[in-house]
Amino acid sequence: MDYSDQELSDNDGEFAFETDHLAIRGNKDYCDLLKYIVQLEAQKVQALKDIEELAFTKSKALKDPLNFVQDIKSGNIKFPSRQTIADLPDIEWDKYGIDVTIGNNSKSSKEELESSMKVRGRMFTDNKPETFNQLWSCEEQKRLEELLEIFPEEAVESRRCKKIADALGTRTPVQVMSRIQKYFTKLAKAGLPIPGRAPKGVYKDKYRDKSSFYKKSTFFPQLHVPVKMDDPHNNSDSMDSALFSETTNGNKNMLELLKAAKEQRQLDETSPVYQTNTMCVGCQKTGFLGARWTDNAGTDFCTDCVVKLLPIEKLIPVR
């Protein structure tokens, strides 16, 4: 690296290629940039040599680690020195009509991306709350249930969520609103009373008094799902036929839903649309690609959640 620095210091005057136009040969900024490029090229060549030397030293150390340690202690092994990259020349780009704000914006966006971190797979930034994408604890769920009884439902449900969030103290109004929506859906499907407005398109009579298995969840920390036994006096043949009919209809509806979802994905490849003003009930995302699957009663799903969850309500894709 010393030889390149010496060359640059000896040629402090005109520094240009023979093929350069005479108009730019005497330009100081142009000469400074050429010097900087030559210096970077020299450092690149030296860096490649250092990499080869380190790779050889690594293979030698793996073959005989004991002798390698002894050589280090005795000072027989010399590692490449660290290179210092010079700063860009200070040039007034305004006089050439070049906008330098573009580079500054990309630099700031890069620094912002590097400073961000992921929480459970989702990007976390400084403008996110501390509880961003974190699971609700059983204590928070119990306190939420108490606050739902304290604060009755209002004409504008967001006001109620704002009051509950202030009283809860650990969640934002948006997080509370999302949690309440999921909680009410769980209650409706379990056939339990809802302390407020039932989710549209979810609270149906076929969910009442219907036993099912539930995974361990913070939604029902104190709930013991009752086990129901079949009545031996009932006609088993009629029950089997009804069960078979229900299963057949369910499989048919599932196939029709998957077929419709496939058609929507094909449309997304030719004429994609984005739902910028709609939030998916399943994944809680906005601005998703494709149609919004709705029951025209306030429940919206994205195509991915429709395929993953297979909702039982009848949904219509709207692009």
Image: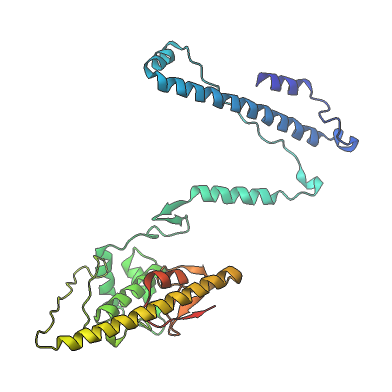
Q: At which x and y percent is residue 308?
A: 39, 69
At x 45% / y 68%, what residue is drawn?
304
The N terminus lies in quadrant: top right
- The answer to whether residue 67 of the structure is visible from this angle is yes
Point out the image quarter for the C terminus: bottom right
**Compared to 149, does 129 lie above or below?**
above
| Residue found at the far right of this picture | 22
Q: Nearer the viewer, residue 247 or 283?
A: 247
Residue drawn at 49 percent across, 69 percent down: 286
Where residue 54 appears, as percent x and y from the top left, is: 51, 24
Residue displayed at 72% across by 29% down = 38
Residue 100: where, in percent of width, then height?
Answer: 71, 48
- Vertically, is 50 above or below 237? above
Q: Is residue 274 visible?
A: no
Q: Is residue 75 above or below residue 194?
A: above
Using the image, determine if residue 203 lies above or below residue 15. Answer: below
Horizontally, is 222 left or right of 147 in the view?
Answer: left
Colour pattern of the rendering: rainbow
Say which of 214 and 252 sits in front: 252
Residue ranking furthest to the left? 233
Count of marks placed on residues: 0
Q: Quadrant of residue 243?
A: bottom left
Residue 222 horizontal/vertical position (percent) = 18, 69
Residue at 46 percent across and 12 percent down: it is: 75
Going by the image, does 8 lie left or right of 105? right
Residue 19, picture quadrant: top right
Please state which of residues 144 and 69 is positioned toward the viewer in this rendering: 69
| Residue 28 or residue 59, whichever sits in front | 59
